[in-house]
Amino acid sequence: MKLRQDHPVETAAAKAGMSRAAGYRISRDPTLPSQKAAARGRRRPDPLEDIFDAEVVPLLQAAPGLRPVAIFGEMLRRHPDLPHGIRRTLERRIRAWRAEHAEEQEVMFRQVHEPGRAGLSDFTDMGACGVTVEGQPLEHLLYHFRMPWSGFEHAHVILGGESFVALAEGLQNALWSLGRAPSQHRSDSLSFAGRKVPRTFR
């Protein structure tokens, strides 16, 4: 207000660090927000005051998937004198009630796969299958490659453990079989990928 004594509204507002609109608003009414009268309440009686907690909430609790338009129709059937203009008010009340009282919903992040974009690699321990060669159990892994969009799959028997060589060999055979390569390749958190190789040569 002191700046307003010597400057126009735009300049005073800029010097005070506020917007021009705020400057004009204060020049019209310099009363502090704390000194203003409280905001007025509802002017009309609440048409849902007697029925929301008594009738609508039990419906929401009994059938959580019930749509607001169905509840609105039921309320009109029970109370023909209700004004038709309360539908939006009822929908807002139902939305607010569900946000506070409804059961938590499972959150799902849907995956969208694009053709030729991603190839997936993984190793599976086949010991539980009981494969034997000449009566002796065969300890082996199965390298598995898959394209999620097309469903193309390729499997490769690995006689050793998980290693970069096994991954490279299995992936090479899968891509030769596929006839092309995806733009991205993903594998599980392989143990060999996180190991530091000691530097023995300079």
Image (cartoon, rainbow, N blue to C red):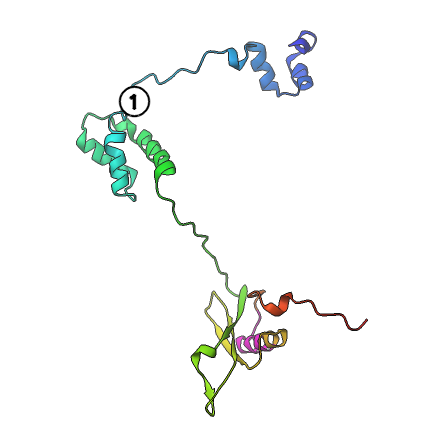
In the rendered view, tell whether residue 151 sits above or below residue 67: below
Q: Residue furthest bottom?
A: 134
Image quadrant occupied by the C terminus? bottom right
In the rendered view, tell whether residue 92 sits above or below residue 19: below
Depth order, front residue of 24/155? 155
The x and y percentages for residue 171 are 57, 74
| Magenta region | 169-181
**Residue at image location 40% in from the left, 50% down from the top:** 106
Amino acid tagged 1: Asp
Q: Quadrant of residue 99?
A: top left
Mark 1, secondary structure of its residue: loop
The x and y percentages for residue 12 are 67, 14
**Residue at image location 52% in from the left, 14% down from the top:** 34
The x and y percentages for residue 72 are 25, 34
Residue under label 1, please give it: 46
Q: Main secondary structure of the magenta part?
A: helix
In the rendered view, tell whether residue 100 sits above or below residue 40: below
Q: Quadrant of residue 31?
A: top right
